[in-house]
Amino acid sequence: MARVNEDFLRLASGYLFPEIARRTRAWQERNPDARLMRLGIGNTTEALPEVLVDAMKHKLDMLADRATYTGYGDEQGDTPLRQALADSYRSRYGVDLPLSAFFVSDGAKSDAANIQSIFSAGSIVAVQDPAYPVYVDSNVAGGHTGSYDEGTGSYGGIIYMPGTAANGFVAQPPKAHADLVYLCFPNNPTGAVATREQLRSFVDYALEERAIIIFDAAYSEYIETEGIPHSIYEIEGAEKCAIEINSFSKNAGFTGVRLGWTIVPETLSCDNAPAGTVHRLWNRRQTTFFNGASNIAQAGGLAALSDEGRAACLSLVDYYKGNARIIRSGLESIGLTCYGGVDSPYVWAACPGGMSSWEFFDFLLDKAHVVVTPGSGFGAAGEGYVRVSAYGHREDVEAAIASIKENLHV
Ligand code: PLP
């Protein structure tokens, strides 16, 4: 008799976004004529830069011609794209990584979810709290955790590293031993960034504990503060203990086009495997379960790394950061305590008057007709906050903030 994988059954139901949708729908039914404004999800809204569109159209024309048609591409991703990625790490961050370390994918989410599968079932996992939910959920489904505890909102067996106002939402490395340490900077949802010294403490921890850091840098292009590292490999020794995941989604507007990359250096070693093994296993995993990113998307990605493409992508990022500034200054002007929104598209706002995340969500929806994301949906330590997303058309963001300023008296 077929049996389902019971590790999947241990996943707590996808509560956050379905519940937001349910409450929003109910509100709309009660207020059919009111204008609803959404600052909830991290989905890009602005048109793709023309230089990227042209590159993808050109690739499509090549596919339409038998003489230039191509099918499956290079196993780890198109060589010119991987070369351009390696070049850009070298020229922009002073990070010298060989071409072989780069694996092109269809986005950061799948890599962030799949990477745990090449590590031992008994691996002890440490995650930031609050965090992008994929790190925890993929480890639950992968059998690396215990059961969900409704009372604490956490899974057994996971080491949670709380980000709080007191530590600027940058946790310390755990006191206990972990095998896999997930880090995301600039952070979703808090918008926090980690200094060189803070990242160094994690690299030191990983080298000492023979742990592997999985560093999600999906928002690295949003960093503007001088001296904040964009890549974990800016920290000496990280090439021996860290995997980095990144994406074209939030800097090039590729949330729908789908393209990302993961760096697995051959110098990475593991407790039961010499240097080269983790790289070899990721290569084996990807070439067995994945047949490469779309060649059209890869042509767009290559264009995004050209001088012209990069400039266009940076102005896209600037647009969203302009929205983030409007959000943060608008919320602060009515007395809310806010974090993030500087090196990040997310503003992390403290709920006023002791309200819980969901109470403040309902309050904003009722009074201002604005949808945000309750912080508690990202982990127990997110309770008491909401995440306000800068992804939206400028006029909609302005209208949402004007409505909050007009209708909220905190
Ligand atoms: N990592 C983080 C921290 C994210 O916030 C997101 C998307 O919101 C992703 C990864 C997913 O990126 P992609 O669109 O490349 O799958």
Image: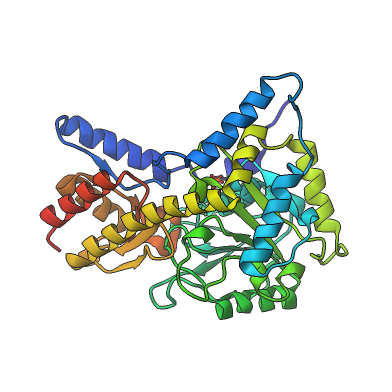
Q: Is residue 114 above or below residue 347?
A: above
Can residue 123 be seen? yes
- Residue 349 position in % (x across, y down): 31, 63
178 sits left or right of 330 in the view? right
- Residue 337 position in % (x across, y down): 27, 69
Q: Quadrant of residue 386?
A: bottom left
Q: Give the camera-side residue of 105 and 115.
A: 105
Please give the name of the residue rendered at 68% of the width and 26% of the height, measured from the top-left corner: 62
Q: Quadrant of residue 350?
A: bottom left
Q: Give the camera-side residue of 88 and 191.
A: 88
Please give the name of the residue rendered at 39% of the width and 38% of the height, measured from the top-left corner: 18
97 sits left or right of 171 in the view? right
- Residue 335 position in % (x across, y down): 19, 68
- Residue 196 position in % (x across, y down): 57, 77
Q: Give the camera-side residue of 218 and 120.
A: 218
362 sits left or right of 97 in the view? left
Q: Give the camera-side residue of 227 and 156.
A: 227
Please give the name of the residue rendered at 80% of the width and 57% of the height, measured from the top-left corner: 278
Looking at the rendering, in which quadrant would you find the N terminus? Answer: top right
Q: Quadrant of residue 174?
A: bottom right
